[in-house]
Amino acid sequence: MTILIRPSAESDLDAITAIYAHAVTYGTASFELDPPSRTEMAGRRAAILDGGYPYIVAEKDGTILGYAYAGAYRTRPAYRSTVEDSIYVAPSAQGKGVGRALLGALLDECEALDFRLIVAVIGDEDSHGSIALHRSLGFELVGVFKGIGYKHGRWLSTVLMERRLGHGIEAPPTRPIAAG
């Protein structure tokens, strides 16, 4: 399967919203309980892009198969070189290399922007595919928050993983402190 990875566009928002709605409704990757509207998703995407973070999509033959972005891990200035990844793949495209293509491209984008650490907060210890994907691309297990959220009638844990990027913590950050 030839997959095109490219920056997201506003015209992708219907597909992005539908992919995320499915993940919220049926999955545990997100701990949201109700799918957000297209307007809300547009605002979230704009905030990511306005913050100088990457937001990409996977496309094949004009169909959006998934999307990924990196956002601030925390908002305090000392965290400015650390990002958290988010990856969502359409149900029909899962298990076909779309997540790997998105995460690989996202890692490249984050290194090009001189982020130093990327964190994965994976919903549910049973998300074996996501855990394996992150591990295969160099993420290491940091820990597990047991029973931190309640969704679909059960307590869910989150798996924390991290991967150093570029110069890692071997040199001071070069990213400026955001104004405000």
Image: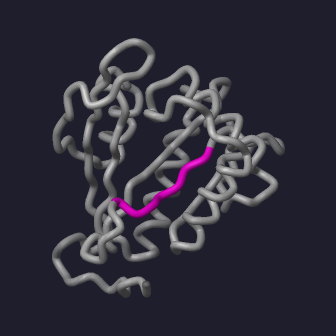
In the image, taking residue 50 as reference, residue 78 lies left or right, namely: left
Image position of 113 with respect to 141: above or below: below
| Residue 78, picture quadrant | bottom left
Location of residue 77 in the rendering, given as x and y in whole percent from the top left corner: 30, 77
Location of residue 146 in the rendering, given as x and y in whole percent from the top left corner: 20, 28
Location of residue 99 in the rendering, given as x and y in whole percent from the top left corner: 52, 39
Image position of 173 with respect to 98: above or below: below
Q: Which residues are magenta?
A: 67-73
| Residue 110, picture quadrant | bottom left
Q: Residue at x 49, y 35 (%)?
A: 32
In the image, taking residue 140 as reference, residue 25 lies left or right, namely: right
Task: Give the camera-side residue of 38 and 52.
Answer: 38
The stretch drawn in magenta includes residue 71: yes
Q: Residue at x 39, y 37 (%)?
A: 133
- The quadrant of the image that shows the N terminus is top right
The number of callouts visible is 0
Q: Residue furthest top?
A: 153
> What secondary structure predominates along the stretch shown in magenta?
strand
The stretch drawn in magenta includes residue 68: yes
